Amino acid sequence: MIRKFVFWIIGIPVAGAVIALSVANRHVVTFSLDPTTKGTPFLAFDVPLYLLLFACIFVGLFLGWGVTWAGQHKWRAKAARKGREASALKREADEHKRRNDPLSAPALPRY
């Protein structure tokens, strides 16, 4: 329910903005990876401007995600370590319960 609401409130306007940007920036530009030669660059591509804009946005998003993910390594490692410690303590507590359970203790012989 909430996903549908978020889609309609955020997704549709974003899609509209993407379509508007694509239509407004559909002329072709030359993307050159050779900054020294302007006339005949060694490596150049003719691409629509909107593709270049969206590629830059996606590269920025993925770089930001990667840097954030790498920066959170300390907390993820700490959480994993605490999880392993909690599992070991739970196993130890279960072993103590099993060993000290009065129902599982051997009964005294009846005479």
Image: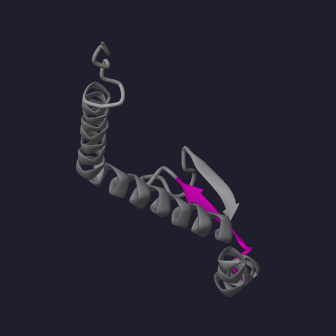
Q: Is 31 within the magenta? A: yes
What residue do we see at 29% from left, 54% from top? 72
Q: Position of residue 46 (x, y in %)?
A: 68, 58
- 46 or 99: which is nearer to us? 99
Q: Where is residue 16 in the image (x, y as percent from the top left)?
A: 73, 84
* Relative vertical location of residue 22 with respect to residue 59 in this rendering, above or below: below
> In screen coordinates, is 60 left or right of 15?
left
**Magenta stretch in the rendered image:** 24-32
Q: Which colour scheme is used?
A: one colour
* Relative vertical location of residue 8 with respect to residue 75 in this rendering, above or below: below
Placement of the N terminus among the 4 image quadrants: bottom right
> In screen coordinates, is 101 left or right of 59?
left
Q: In which quarter of the image is residue 82?
A: top left
What residue do we see at 31% from left, 37% from top? 87
Placement of the C terminus among the 4 image quadrants: top left
How many labels were placed on the picture? Answer: 0
Q: Quadrant of residue 99?
A: top left
Q: Is 71 within the magenta? A: no
> In screen coordinates, is 86 left or right of 28?
left
Q: In which quarter of the image is residue 11?
A: bottom right
- 85 or 21: which is nearer to us? 85
Q: Position of residue 56 (x, y in %)?
A: 53, 63
Q: Which residue lies furthest to the front in this view?
A: 111
Q: Where is residue 36 in the image (x, y as percent from the top left)?
A: 42, 53
> In screen coordinates, is 104 left or right of 59?
left
